[in-house]
Every structure is written in C-alpha cells, then in structure tokens.
Image (cartoon, rainbow, N blue to C red):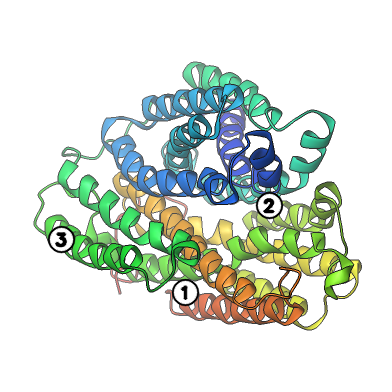
C-alpha cells in the first residue's frame, strides 16, 4: 500500500481515537461548572462521569468483536456516527438527565481503540505495524492529557457546551474521512456475535463498576453495594461458563489464557488504577486553597497547565517507544513505563509543597503512561491471531477502565475518609493515596515482568506460537 495512503488512514484513526480519549477527561475538571449551570447536586453531576465509564466498559469489547466479524471499517464509521450523535446531544442538553444519556451514547466510542488497532494490523505493511500502533497509543495517551489541559481555557473563554461542540466538528470530519479513505478489512473472524455472552459480560461489568464507582456515596456496607458485588460474582461465573461452552464466544477465553495476553491484561488493570487516580485527584489537590495547609489554590486553567508536562511526555514517550521496539523487548518498555509512573507517585507522596514538584512528577508520570500504552497494545496485538485483534485489544482497554474505577474508588476512600472541620481533606490523606498508587503501579511492573520476552511483532497474520502460549 502506498505510504501516502497509510499516512491518511493513520491520521483518520488518530483523530477518532484522540477525540474519544479527550472526551474521557475533558469533562472532569469542569464538573463543578456543569453542576452549577444545570442546577443539580454533586451526586447527580458525578453520573456524567459514571455513565460514560459504564457505557465505554460495556461497548469496547463487544463492538470490538462485532468489528472482527462484520468488518472494521463499517463498524468504525458506525461508532463515529454514534459518538457524533452523543456529542451533539450533550452540547444541546437542557438538563443533567439528557447530558447523562448523551454520555452513555458517547461511551460507544471506546470501540474506536480496538477497531483502530485491528485496521492498522490489516492494512499496514508488516514492518510498520508495531511503530504505527505505538504512535496511535501515544495519541490516545496524549488525548487524555489534552482534555485535562484544555478544559479550563475552553470553559473560561466560552462555556462548558463547547467541551462538546469542538468534538462534534472533529468527529463529523473524521467519520467522513473514514468512510472515504479507510478500506474495509480483508480479514473477518468466523461465527456470529454471542449475544448471551454480551449480555452476561455487560451484566457483570455494570454490577462490578457501579458499586466500585458509587460505593463511597452509597456506603461500602450498604445493601445495594453488597448485592451488586454478589451479582457481579454470579454473573461473572455464568459468563465464564457460557463463553467456554460457546461455539462462537464473544471473548475467546483460550486467547485470554495466552501468557503475553493475561500478563499484559493484569498490568493494564493495575496501571489503569494508578493512571485514573492521578488524573482524577491531582488537579483537585493543586486547586485546594492554601488555608488547608497544602495545595496552591490554583484555578482550573492553572491546574491544567501544571499537567502540561504530563501531556508532552506522554506523546513523546509513545512516539519514541515505537522507534525503540524493533531493538527493545516490548515487555521491558512496559516495565519501564510502570516503574516510571510508580516513581512519579512516590515523588508526589514525598514532595508536593512546590508547584515545580507537581510539574516534575506529572512529567515523569506522563513518560510512564506513554511507554506503557504503546507496549501494552503491541504485546496484545502480537499475542493473538489477526481475527481476534478487536476483541482482545478491546478487553485490554476495558480492563484498564475497570482498574481506573477501582483505583479512583480506593483514592476517594483514602482522601475523603478523614476531613478537616472545613470539609477539606488532610494533607496526609493525599500522601496515603499517592503511596497506595505507587504500590499498585509497582504491581503492574511485576505483572509485566511475567510476560514472555520477545521483540515487537511484525506480521499482521501472526498465529499463536508455543512461546506466546506459555
């Protein structure tokens, strides 16, 4: 395929993946503004985030599998149009209820990640697959950082509606370009969508993530939380049984048992916990008024600028890792990324009294995220057959989201369990949460160390090998 064509395909995929990644974090810094503008409670406003998380977690692996079966291009275009509708509805939402529905619709865009990885594997020359996946991972990682940095200026200069109007334009153009320039994938998985597997997968994910994300508000010992956790266990067991006995499983459990896959998925779960916690709570830390004994009383815009080193480091590290993978084991890059992120959290736990310390820690953390995102994607793509790419990479992204929900819940519990008379957390609460994230990220490095050592994969038609299946 001509180089010009692949560059255009990559630009289309990067636009779609980048804007969805941005939507994940764009609304978080502006949530108090949205709450005030729509005259709703803080508890209700947080559903703007929770609904998006639940929808993305359910849609990502399911639609990724649909793409493997029905064709990745047509599925990608359908997903982009769905995200477009969700963004348009959010921009016009007259109340918080409509905004929450819009966020559920936007969550379908999580499938852009596995579909894009699959298209790269199908359409690019073998020697360019690994580097292109790394570059796309860099865009995905940086997109989340762009959301954090851009939210303040957009809300201050315009209003929160423009957090969705800008994506409307980008997604609309991306969908048209995808329809015109992205070719349909030549490889299709055989079989059909296992709707029973999809329903059971959706059931246990929702039953798990709902109490994890809302437990601090409902009470961890409340009947609702206990009942949902119990339901998650039962539904997960039923899902495993159904998938293992299905002729056309939604998620091939044999693939999930491949050593390079399960170790990378374990690392994704733990890494997601640390990453989402930093994104969710570090801006709040720097915005805390100095009267609390810590914090800098920063505005949303200033707190976003302190995250700018993270954004730059994420993108640079992701791109550089693509150049390194032909010479360096992808496993080592993942270990390096997890260790770098752990070091950043340790810096925050020990030194956070000056703004430059926050900026340095953010930069080191961004370095870790950039390395980890690209290496995780390449390890998964290199460990599964081409026709399983969408489902496998979708499940990896999904586990990162599950880890994010768990990490955010842990951090929320540590930060809010003991409050000052003013209602603000103690400095020690943040120190404990940063320390806990350090341990989780070291766990991610340990999981990555268990992955089989091998160079980046070149062949888009890779089949499972004895070494990969160890």
Q: Secondary structure at mark 1?
A: loop
Packing grade of label 3 (10 A; few <14, some 14-19, many >=20) is: some
Q: Quadrant of residue 341?
A: bottom right
Kindly identify which numbered label has been placed on residue 319.
Answer: 2
Q: Percent from the top left, x then y, of residue 6?
A: 56, 31
- Tell me which label, 2 or 3, sits earlier in the chain: 3
Q: Residue furthest front?
A: 421
Q: Percent from the top left, x then y, of residue 98?
A: 49, 29
Q: How far separated are the C-alphas under marks 2 and 1?
A: 21 Å
Q: How far separated are the C-alphas under marks 3 and 1?
A: 34 Å
Q: Nearer the viewer, mark 2 or mark 3?
A: 3
Q: How far separated are the C-alphas under marks 2 and 3?
A: 41 Å
Q: Nearer the viewer, residue 287 or 123?
A: 287
Q: Nearer the viewer, residue 344 or 224?
A: 224
Task: Read off the residue under disc 3.
Answer: 238
Q: Nearer the viewer, mark 3 or mark 1?
A: 3
Q: Secondary structure at mark 3?
A: helix
Q: Percent from the top left, x then y, of residue 385?
A: 31, 51
- Tell me which label, 3 or 1, sits earlier in the chain: 3
- Tell me which label, 2 or 1, sits earlier in the chain: 2
Left or right side of 120 for 292: right
Q: Is residue 293 above or below residue 90?
A: below
Task: Read off the residue under disc 1.
Answer: 453
**Quadrant containing the C terminus in the rendered view:** bottom left
Q: Quadrant of residue 122?
A: top left
């Amino acid at each position: 395929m001509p180089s010009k064509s692949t560059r255009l395909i990559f630009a289309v995929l990067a636009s779609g993946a980048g804007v969805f990644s941005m939507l994940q974090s764009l609304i978080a810094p502006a949530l108090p503004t949205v709450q005030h503008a729509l005259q709703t409670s803080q508890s209700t406003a947080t559903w703007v985030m929770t609904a998006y998380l639940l929808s993305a977690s359910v849609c990502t692996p399911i639609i990724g599998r649909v793409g493997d079966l029905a064709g990745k291009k047509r599925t990608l275009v359908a997903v982009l149009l769905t995200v477009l509708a969700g963004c348009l509805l959010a921009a016009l939402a007259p109340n918080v209820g409509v905004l929450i529905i819009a966020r559920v619709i936007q969550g379908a865009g999580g499938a852009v990640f596995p579909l894009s990885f699959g298209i790269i594997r199908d359409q690019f020359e073998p020697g360019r697959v690994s580097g292109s996946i790394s570059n796309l991972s860099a865009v995905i990682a940086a997109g989340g950082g762009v959301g954090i940095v851009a939210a303040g200026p957009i809300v201050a200069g315009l209003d929160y509606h423009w957090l969705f109007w800008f994506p409307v334009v980008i997604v609309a153009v991306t969908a048209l370009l995808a329809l015109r320039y992205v070719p349909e994938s030549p490889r299709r998985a055989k079989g059909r969508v296992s709707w029973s597997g999809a329903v059971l997968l959706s059931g246990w994910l929702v039953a798990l993530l709902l109490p994890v994300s809302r437990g601090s508000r409902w009470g961890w010992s409340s009947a609702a939380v206990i009942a949902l956790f119990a339901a998650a266990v039962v539904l997960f067991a039923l899902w495993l049984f159904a998938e293992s006995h299905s002729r056309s499983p939604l998620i091939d459990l044999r693939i999930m048992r491949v050593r390079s896959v399960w170790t990378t998925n374990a690392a994704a779960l733990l890494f997601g916990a640390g990453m989402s916690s930093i994104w969710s709570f570090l801006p709040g830390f720097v915005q805390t008024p100095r009267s609390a004994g810590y914090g800098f009383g920063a505005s949303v815009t200033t707190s976003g600028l302190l995250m700018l080193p993270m954004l730059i480091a994420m993108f640079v590290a992701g791109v550089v890792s693509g150049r390194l993978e032909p010479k360096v084991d992808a496993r080592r890059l993942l270990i390096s990324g997890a260790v770098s992120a752990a070091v950043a959290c340790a810096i925050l736990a020990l030194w956070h009294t000056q703004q430059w310390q926050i900026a340095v820690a953010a930069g080191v953390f961004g370095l870790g995220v950039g390395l980890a995102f690209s290496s995780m994607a390449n390890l998964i793509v290199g460990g599964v057959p081409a026709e399983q790419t969408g489902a496998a990479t979708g499940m990896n992204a999904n586990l990162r989201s599950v880890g994010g929900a768990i990490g955010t819940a842990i951090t929320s519990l540590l930060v809010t369990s003991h409050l000052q008379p003013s209602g603000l957390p103690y400095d020690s609460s943040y120190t404990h949460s940063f320390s806990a994230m350090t341990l989780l990220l070291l766990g991610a490095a340990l999981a990555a160390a268990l992955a089989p050592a091998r160079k980046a994969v070149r062949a888009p038609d890779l089949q499972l090998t004895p070494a990969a299946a160890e």
